[in-house]
Structures are given as C-alpha cells and as structure tokens.
Image (tube, rainbow, N blue to C red):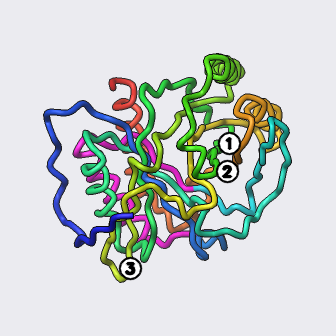
Amino acid sequence: MPVRRVDRVGESPPPSQTLPTMRFMIFRKADAQTEAGLLPSTDLLTAMTAYNESLSRAGVLLAGEGLKPSAEGVRYHYTGGEATVTDGPFAETKELVAGFTTIQARSLDEAVAWARRWPAEDGDVTLEVRQVHEPVPSFGTPDPARRQFIAIWSAPPQAETQTEPSAEMQQAMGQLMADTAAAGVLLEAGGLLPSAVGARVVFEDGTPTVVDGPFSESKEVIGGYAVYQADSLEALRPWSERFGRVVGDGTSEIRPVYGAEDFGEAFTPELQAQEDRLRAEAAARTQTD
C-alpha cells in the first residue's frame, strides 16, 4: 500500500480545468471523543465554519454533517438477506464514522488536497476520501420538523472485487429507492467506487500522511450511503430490512445527525447565520450541477 507524506497546505488546490467534476465524500473517522459524545468547542466550530467557507468560495462544497455517537445508532447485519439488528454502541471505534463532507472535484488528488486542509483544531484525525458513483439524484426536500439520519453501508473488502450487481438487483434497488423517496423518507443515496481508487489522510502532530487505497486491513469497507428523514430510528426499520433483502450481505449502520440545537451556546448566533448561508449555497449548487 503506497504512502506519501505531505505538509498541510494553506492555499486552495488548483482545479484541473480539463476534467469533468466528480463527487467525493470525505469521511471523518470516529475517535474516543466523538464516541463519548463530547461536543465541539466554539473554536472548533469556528474553524470548521471557516473551512466550509473556503470550500464554498471555491464552489466545491455540496453538503456536510456530523453524526451522533454510535450509542445512539443501530446496526443491521445482513446475511443472505436476513437482518440481525444490534443497538449501539459499537466497540470498533476506528472503523466508525463521525461525520462527512461532500465536495465536487475533478480528480482524487484535488479532493485529497482539500482533505489535507482539514482544520488543525480538530486534532489528529483520519479522513477517508472516496468517489461517488454518478449521477447522484436528489430524492426529496428536507422537512425541518423531522430528524435526519445517515445510513452507511459496508461490506468485507473482498466484496469490492466482485462482479457488478445483476440486472435484477439493480432493478430491485431502483424500486426500493423510488418507494422510499415516494414515502418522503429518502433524501439522497449513492454508491462509492472501490477503495482502491480512494485515499486516507491521517493527521499526526498536524502533519498529514496520505495513504492510497485499497484498505484491505479494514474489517469492512464503506460501499455506499443514504440520507433519510424520519421521526425515529424505528421508523426506518422496514426500509432497512428491505434494503438487506436487496443487497443480501453486508452491514448498514444508521445514526442520527447533529442539529444546531445540539451544540448549545458554543454554536453562536453568528456561526448559525454562517451555517444557514453555507447550506443554502450548497443546496443551490447541488441543484445546478
């Protein structure tokens, strides 16, 4: 597995004008603090907002969310289409996701360059950069009265080398997404390209090390995601079980998303105003791309 060490950069990565724009997910891996439910300080919230501002100014920011600890989530383990449900927390902290940022870039290197600029205030973190299959349709409009949840589907690394899903599976998945969207539950969903064409950015003492995929040392590799809105985790159970019957094997972990109200006084009115503007800009950008 090739590794290359680079310094944290201070300027925006130069975009390649000769390639089409692609969508990338930057997954912020969990650590002991995020799993303990420790909320970010005003300093970290300010730094993350400034980072998102730089993404937005460059026209690359599409979305971003923080996930609540796995103790507040649930995991569906699928074997032969049958689901076993386990409530959190989940012990394998390094395999968990604490949040994600979605950007558009013209290459993996450009996406990794943005990941390298992750705020130093977040400490020694690990980021995983993965390309999303295109196109990524938007299925619904967020309802402020309903909670949002993120489902992350993972499978053993060897599953990445398997053949493309059958026509029957693709048809069944398409019907599932259409039905979930028609019920007002599904907001977005996407599959990820294999980790062999992804990378991880590991920060240690402020210095990022870029590790190229594949990530065969992991027990499971992220294969896709979905953004849901619902009144509760339990309300998503029928859809999650139906998803398992389509994919057959793997794991789907569903976690609630942090809302502005969760951060208390650390999330100042000024930061809230910036957040609202950035979300509106990202939503407009998504609709036009």
> Is residue 256 depicted above or below 249 in this figure?
below
Question: What separation in Å lies between label 3 and label 1 (alpha carbons)?
Answer: 35 Å
Name the quadrant of the N terminus.
bottom left
Q: Do tag 1 and tag 2 residues touch (Cβ < 8 Å)?
A: yes
* Pointer 3 residue: 204
Looking at numbered disc 1 in the image, what kind of residue is underneath it?
Arg
* Pointer 2 residue: 256
Q: Nearer the viewer, residue 44 or 222?
A: 222
| Crowd tier of the residue under label 1, counting other residues whose Cα lies within 10 Å: few below 14, some 14–19, many 20 or above | some
Quadrant for residue 59, please give it: top left
Residue at x 67%, y 17% (from the top left corner): 168
Camera sees residue 32: yes
> Is residue 205 depicted above or below 226 in this figure?
below
- In the rendered structure, which disc, 3 or 1, sits on the residue that comes first in sequence? 1
Residue at x 37%, y 59% (from the top left corner): 212
| Crowd tier of the residue under label 3, counting other residues whose Cα lies within 10 Å: few below 14, some 14–19, many 20 or above | few
Quadrant for residue 70, please give it: bottom right
Looking at numbered disc 2 in the image, what kind of residue is underneath it?
Pro
Tell me the SS state at disc 2. Answer: strand
Tell me the SS state at disc 1. Answer: strand
Residue at x 47%, y 44% (from the top left corner): 194
Whether residue 56 appears in magenta in the rendering, the answer is: yes
3 vs 1, front mark: 3
- In the rendered structure, which disc, 1 or 2, sits on the residue that comes first in sequence? 1
Residue at x 62%, y 22% (from the top left corner): 166
* Boundaries of the magenta span: 39-66
- In the rendered structure, which disc, 2 or 3, sits on the residue that comes first in sequence? 3
* Pointer 1 residue: 147
1 vs 2, front mark: 2
2 vs 3, front mark: 3
Q: Do tag 2 and tag 3 residues touch (Cβ < 8 Å)?
A: no
